[in-house]
Amino acid sequence: MKFANRIRCFFIVSLSCLFGTQSFAAVETLDSIAAIVNDDVVLVSEIQERYQNYLSQAEARNVEQSAMPPKDVILNQVIERLIIESIQLQEADMRGIVISDEELADGIKRYAESINVTQEFFREELQRQGVDFREFREDMRRQLTLNRVQQTVVQQRIFISMQDIKEFRASPIFQELASEEFRIGHILLTISDSNNARVVSRAQQQAEEIVEELRKGANFASMAVQHSSSNTALEGGDLGWRKASQVPSLFSDLVQTLEVGETADPIENPIGIHIVQLLEKRGASTATGMSTNVRHILIRPSTILPEEDALELANEIRGRIVNGEAFAELAMEYSDDPGSALVGGDLGWTSGETLVDEFREVMINTEKGELSEVFKSEFGFHVLEVLDRREEDLTEDALNNLAYQSIFNQRFEETHQAWMKEIRDRAYVKVLLEVQ
């Protein structure tokens, strides 16, 4: 996809389903109200923009005109999506969810990185495409707000028990998901005449010399370019990341016994002599590191408690802890995190992998026995205390975290759709635009 189309497609409504007053044809050049949604409105101009974006996306995907859904079907789908977005944005406003300029700038930076361009180039390309950067920023803010309110609401509705995790970990799906991956270096020495003992012996001697050099620290990629007859020679013999089931059967069992950086003895078969080195290894069973015992108090902004007041309350609670009041009692009284409030804000031992970036960073930078300053995440304002730290094998934690995230992802869409139906059913919606 061309870069210009990639930019346009970022904000196009996702029409994953196949495609219910005044006439669209009659007012398509006017900016009038197309629908009333609670206290908000959907404008005809918004529908026009989304419709044109859909056409651009279809063109970028080379969709033939004959395969396009009828215009009225697309427009009805666009109108419904704008209505749902409006309801969700109103929910975000009611919950006090606001995307700060700093978060917005970070979102734009991450998006530019996701399409492998610099921010400067990205902004210049927007300008060349005639896209106003301020409008782009507001579209991005809108999208981030939608993501935030969906995550906030849905996460509160998903409960995953240890029994759920245990059962999922026993499933074949998880066994494949959690299996280790290996990055393997491979050198192939072909034997020009396998019936000639002298030729075979010379190839075997060369293989042993290469292995010896590699074990002394020679660069595998350079050795592969020099000696390998494999079609991966120019890539330094790198076979890329593969699960055990994807490793060539000739050395699949052997690879699983190697340490990272270790070179195996030469392996011979009718094709030639193979030299393999385990370049890297990853997977839940390799997880080790620092684990932290942490507790926190969350104050979530809302319509009743605006952001400024939430921040003030969080600072007040921190001050009370500093002055000697019990952290656990204040957490039970004030924390808006239902999962930890009842146990005094205790999150237990964690490596931080399942925590949001802001929380994990503060946790890592807070000394053992210390109380953090108040900080903000997508969920609200936090104050945390690091109770203890230890270096440990995190294999079990990593496997449980992987299972938890997999289950969460499975349940997210179903829970999200149920929530959207719920808010759609209770919203006041009046469509004024008759699509033709």
Image (cartoon, rainbow, N blue to C red):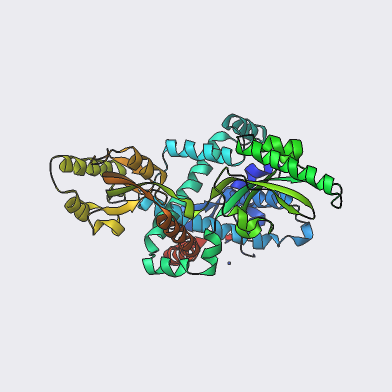
Quarter of the figure with residue 310:
top left
- In the rendered view, would you say 262 is above or below 346? above
Locate residue 391 relative to residue 210 in the image: left or right: left
Tell me if residue 205 can be seen. yes
Q: Which of 215 and 377 is in front in this view?
A: 215
Q: Position of residue 154 (x, y in %)?
A: 42, 60
- Left or right: 175 in relation to 368: right
Q: Which residue is drawn at 43% across and 60% down?
A: 404
Task: Classify 224 as above or below 406.
Answer: above
Q: In which quarter of the image is the N terminus?
A: top right
Q: Nearer the viewer, residue 372 or 217?
A: 217
Of 205 and 390, nearer the camera is 205
The outermost residue toward the left is 324
Query: So how many labels did they put on this image?
Result: 0
Where does residue 398 sit, x and y in percent of width and height?
Answer: 43, 55
Above/below status of 317 relative to 16: above
Q: Tell me which residue sits at (22%, 44%) in the image.
A: 313
Quadrant for residue 220, please give it: top right
Residue 400, quarter of the rendered image:
bottom left
Percent of width and height locating residue 412: 47, 62
Q: Tell me residue 364's x, y (percent).
A: 35, 40
Residue 86 located left or right of residue 120: left
Regarding residue 190, the answer to whether it shows in the image is no
